[in-house]
Image (cartoon, grey):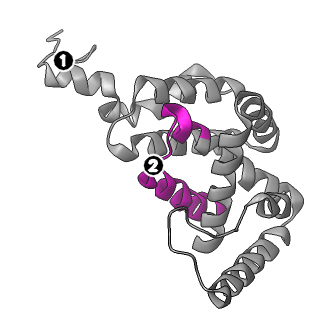
Amino acid sequence: MFERLVRSFPGAGAVPGAPRASSEDAASETAAIRQIVARLEAMAPERARFLAGFAYVMSRAAQADLEISDAETQRMEAALVEQGGLDEAQAVLVVEMAKLESRRNGATADYLVTREFARLATLEEKLAVLRCCFLVSAADTSISAEEASVVNQIARELHVDPHQLNRVRREFVEQMSAIQALRQMGTPPPGEGTDG
């Protein structure tokens, strides 16, 4: 998978809009990317599929508003380092590949990749990816209704019980745009402000 994705990267490692690197720099960059890919491809196939799926599922949450920001990208990379045990360079490459595939393939691939991830993941790993989806969505300090809806869809595709999803969601209640809007209007969110 990693090799196929890297081959599909036109000018792998190039940053759009950046000045063109010299041929020496480009060769060095390409060699570095190949070393990272070789380390990724040396993983057990199941582990590689799991990490690719983890990154792809997070990219779905990031893509919910049709744009993946730098802050969201950094959150995805950090999650792969923390949750996946990748080094920073590997995490950067896996996230970039996942973002590229997510943008290119759309809804059908979203479902298929998430279904495959569900097959590979334990319940704890499914909850971890949902938590990371909320973290990625909250990268700009607010989780929009669209982002929350995509995370809900991901949870359904992962076959996560709504009660378990709600336990994870409660960790991010203050980042929910609807809750933030209520607070700005001076209205307590449901369940708050009652003297019982």
Q: Tell me the CA gap for discs 2 and 1.
A: 31 Å
Please report the residue visible at 31 percent of the width from the left and 21 percent of the height from the top: 178
Nearest the camera: 124 or 131?
A: 131
Position of residue 85 measured from the top left corner of the image (x, y, whole percent):
64, 66
Position of residue 47 measured from the top left corner of the image (x, y, whole percent):
80, 58
Nearest the camera: 120 or 194?
A: 120
Q: Main secondary structure of the magenta part?
A: helix
Please report the residue visible at 73 percent of the width from the left and 47 percent of the height from the top: 53
Horizontal side of 117 relative to 66 (left or right) equals right
Looking at this view, name the residue that lies furthest to the top: 196
Position of residue 97 measured from the top left corner of the image (x, y, whole percent):
69, 56
What quarter of the picture does the N terminus occupy? bottom right
Please report the residue visible at 72 percent of the width from the left and 33 percent of the height from the top: 110
Magenta highlight range: 60-84
| Res 55 visible | no
Mark 1: few, some, or many residues within 10 Å (few <14, many ≥20)? some
Q: In the rendered image, which quarter is residue 162 located in?
A: top right
Residue type beneath disc 2: Ser
Looking at this view, name the residue that lies furthest to the left: 186
Q: Which residue is mark 1?
A: 188
Residue type beneath disc 1: Pro
SS for dot 2 = loop
Looking at this view, name the residue that lies furthest to the right: 45
Q: Which residue is mark 2?
A: 69
What quarter of the picture does the C terminus occupy? top left
SS for dot 1 = loop
Mark 2: few, some, or many residues within 10 Å (few <14, many ≥20)? some
